Image: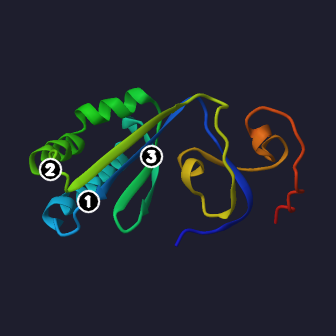
């Protein structure tokens, strides 16, 4: 289990970055032979990405419910993401296999959303959490001073509506 870090923290990223949300949805639960290979393919892709940091992949968090597996991924640039999508061996293999085995038959859904984030156009807060999400992909820093409120993290000015507890 990841170590909880008491206190309030935020993430710091140098330069622009990409948030990529990708996942699958099981539309027909009984079609295990269709959705299980889709679910397993992500593991191989992640292994490939973590072994090759030059590909621009910064990190991910995974989320599951009864029908969906979703990942929030962080990438250095859209060019890195697109290059991997079009040339990454594990991704191309998974893409071809999906089109061949599932295609448009409706048994398994897939989705992705891509967000290009400019410097200073994001904010986040982690209270009493392990290093998570964007802070895991970038730098985990205390949410103090300029980083104390959401408006300040976005470059504006205001005072906390509720005083922040002292850092431990």
How would you rate the neighbour count of disc 3 (Cα within 10 Å): few for under 14, some for 14-19, many for 20 or more?
many
Q: Is residue 146 above or below residue 126?
A: above
Whether residue 49 is visible, yes or no, is: yes
Q: Describe the element under mark 3 as helix, strand or loop.
A: strand
Find disc 1 in the rendering and name its residue: 27
Find disc 2 in the rendering and name its residue: 105
62 sits left or right of 130 in the view: left
72 sits left or right of 32 in the view: right
The CA distance from mark 2 to mark 3 is 27 Å
Whole-percent x and y of residue 61?
47, 55
Name the one closer to the observer, 168 or 18. 18
At 26% across and 59% down in the image, what residue appears? 27
Q: Is residue 137 above or below residue 8?
A: above
Compare marks 2 and 3 and give the one earlier in the sequence. 3
**Residue 150 lies in quadrant:** top right
The CA distance from mark 1 to mark 2 is 10 Å
- Which labelled disc corresponds to residue 73? 3
Q: Describe the element under mark 1 as helix, strand or loop.
A: loop
At 17% across and 67% down in the image, what residue appears? 32
Q: Describe the element under mark 2 as helix, strand or loop.
A: loop
Badge nearest the viewer, 3 or 1: 1
Q: Is residue 168 above or below residue 82?
A: below
């Amino acid at each position: 289990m990841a170590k909880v870090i008491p206190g309030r923290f935020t993430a710091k990223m140098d330069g622009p970055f990409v948030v990529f949300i990708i996942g699958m949805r099981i539309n027909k639960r009984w079609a295990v032979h269709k959705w299980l290979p889709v679910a397993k393919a992500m593991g191989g892709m992640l292994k490939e990405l973590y072994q090759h940091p030059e590909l621009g992949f910064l990190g991910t968090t995974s989320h599951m419910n009864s029908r969906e597996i979703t990942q929030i991924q962080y990438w250095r640039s859209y060019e890195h993401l697109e290059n991997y999508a079009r040339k990454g061996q594990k991704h191309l293999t998974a893409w071809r296999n999906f089109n061949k085995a599932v295609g448009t038959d409706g048994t398994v859904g897939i989705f992705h959303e891509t967000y290009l984030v400019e410097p200073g156009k994001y904010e986040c807060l982690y209270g009493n959490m392990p290093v998570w999400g964007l802070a895991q992909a970038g730098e985990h820093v205390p949410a103090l001073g300029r980083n104390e409120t959401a408006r300040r993290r976005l470059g504006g000015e205001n005072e906390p509506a509720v005083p922040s507890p002292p850092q431990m």
